[in-house]
Image (tube, helix red, strand yellow):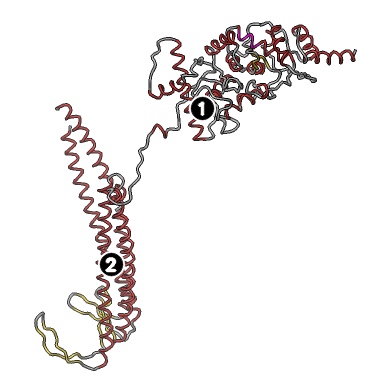
Amino acid sequence: MAGGGGRADMEPLGGVHRLREEQEKVVKDCERRIQHWSKVSGDYEALSDRLKTLPDRLSYDIMVPFGPLAFMPGKLVRTNEVTVLLGDNWFAKCSAKQAQAVVDHRMSHVKKELEDLSKTRKNFESRVGLAKDLETMSASKGEYVDIREEVTTSVVTKGKQRIAHKPNSKPKLDVMLDLNEEEEEKDGGSSKGVLTEEELWRRLDELERLEELQDERDRLSDAADMNGEDSSSSSSEEEKEASSAPPVNGLSLKPGWSPAPPSSTPPPDRKAEDDDEEEEEGSRLPTIFFSHTVEPKKVRINTGKNTTLKFSERKEQKEHSKRKKKNGHSNGHAHHELHKITSPADIYRLFVDVRNGEPIPRKSILKSRSRENSVCSDTSESSAADFEERRVMGRSFSHDEATHSDTSDGITEEDSPTTVPPLSSSRFEAFSGTVIEKDPMPSGVPHLTIVPPALPTILERKQEEVASDVPEAPPKRLSKFKAARLQQK
Amino acid sequence: MAEAIQQKLKAELEKFSQVQKDVSKSMSVRQKLETQLTENNIVKEELGLLDSSNTVYKLIGPVLVKQDLDEAKATVTKRLEYITGEIQRYEALLKDMEKRADDHREVLTSLQQELQKAQAAKSPNCG
């Protein structure tokens, strides 16, 4: 029966049928035994009655059976002596009453057997019914239908293949608009021939995007899977953030913050905490997924004017920078070449506001700029030290003009910081206090005239040197510190 | 090659069937012993119910031989012990035989697989 049951799944009809047959056999056997025992019980009942009446008379006139066909008259004497078969060829001569006791004793035994057999029969009858149902189900004849699901290994596999990506190992091609197409193509299994380098890069991008998509899927399923693939550097964070957006939106252009909040949250957080950039990437909360997107790595930025701005690497940056030079794009484009953050300074470089079509570095990235419709981050006008601003601006500008490199400095070219101040001046608010960042400008600073030493005085001097027209904030700062110094003196 | 395997298979099959027969035989003997055991238990009980006034007979062939009650009780007890011992012996025997049967079965299956492989190898060559 077990064998039949085990085979039931494989050969529904054969296995179940066999199972049913076996079970029915058991049921029949049980019935047979029950019949036997009930007969025995009947016999014993009759015997008991006879034993009761036998000693009533000393002798009985009976017709004694003489073979199978003849009888002869006879007498039944010594009615009280009964030879009882005890079992196993043992006999005992007993009185009628003693025999009666024996009979009663045996009767109890028989009854017990009968009960057991009837219970077994009931059990097997139910099993037979079940087997019948199963048979009809598997044959799809009955009302119930067996639900079967084909297991697709592609869906089940969780251990996806991971490719170790170097940060910015490959440039992100401009595929913003073609994202969906590429995805579809990819899904369709279109393999692009590696004809040119650009195509190669495109192919790599697609693959990476797909993998990120898979990462997202895995993360969604696991809810705890931290995507540490691309988190080697901050730049990869950006990529991830950007990539996280597409799956949610599907389109490269989307107004404001897309339904992918995780992607949006990183930028401000990232700006806020330099050191935590890498951590933020999908690690803090299981729900923050950065590498969802299949889109090119872009950071979606709410510009207010342009819906989404994205970071793209290299080529995109180049393109955008070119565009910027021509058109003065919105903020987002300014970020393209700057998106790689390897040092705090990069933050300011990245998140710049664009005014009048020109990227203007913010004073502080920590504060929101909601009213300015500027970059996504929370930077506000209440800025940090002017030098930072100038630094950012200078960097942004430098980036625009120079070849875009993803190095942290990025600011290979020392752009004229002088150009920066004029732009910034119009924007900056009055800042009574001085926020001096001593860390942020480890390497990139040298390029700028403004070197951020630890001492504000030096900054002031630098500011003075550079910021010919640093507006409200620098003068105030200068004045303040100068006043202090003067006081000290 | 295939023929050799086939012959081996046949020999193994015979051995296996032999072992299977032994297994079934031992099983039937054991079952008989089981019934005897129950019966003797009942006899023991019955004898306990009786007192010395009743004469106990033992059927030996067509003859009923008178027996003493105590003797009968002792005899039945001894028989019970003997039966239980026999049952245990047969159980051990049965286990051993079943194991041997399993081994034979495995050998048979492996031989069958080899035979199939050989046949498969042969058929593509010929066909």
User: Is label 2 in a helix, a strand or a loop?
Assistant: helix
Q: Amino acid at mark 1?
A: Asn
Which percent across, then down, holds residue A76?
19, 90
Residue for point 64% across, 6% down = A413
The residue stretch that appears in magenta: A395-400
Residue that badge 2 annotates? B35
Is residue A173 toward the left or the right of residue A474 in the image?
Answer: left
Among the 4 quarters of the image, the one containing residue B63: bottom left
| Chain for disc number 1 | A
Mark nearest the camera among 2 and 1 is: 1
Residue for point 50% across, 19% down = A176
- Work out whether residue A83 can be spotted: yes
Which percent across, then down, holds residue A469?
76, 8
Q: Amino acid at mark 2?
A: Thr
Residue for point 14% across, 27% down = B126
Whether callout 2 and callout 1 share a subunit is answered: no
| Chain for disc number 2 | B
| Viewport quadrant of the C terminus of chain A | top right
User: Is label 1 in a helix, a strand or a loop?
Assistant: helix
What numbered label is drawn on residue A249? Answer: 1
Q: Main secondary structure of the magenta part?
A: helix
Q: Is residue A297 above or below residue A458?
A: below
Q: Nearer the viewer, residue A357 or A152?
A: A357
For disc 1, the neighbor class at 10 Å (few under 14, some 14 to 19, many from 20) is: some
Which percent across, then down, holds residue A31?
26, 66
Is residue A267 toward the left or the right of residue A164 in the image?
Answer: right
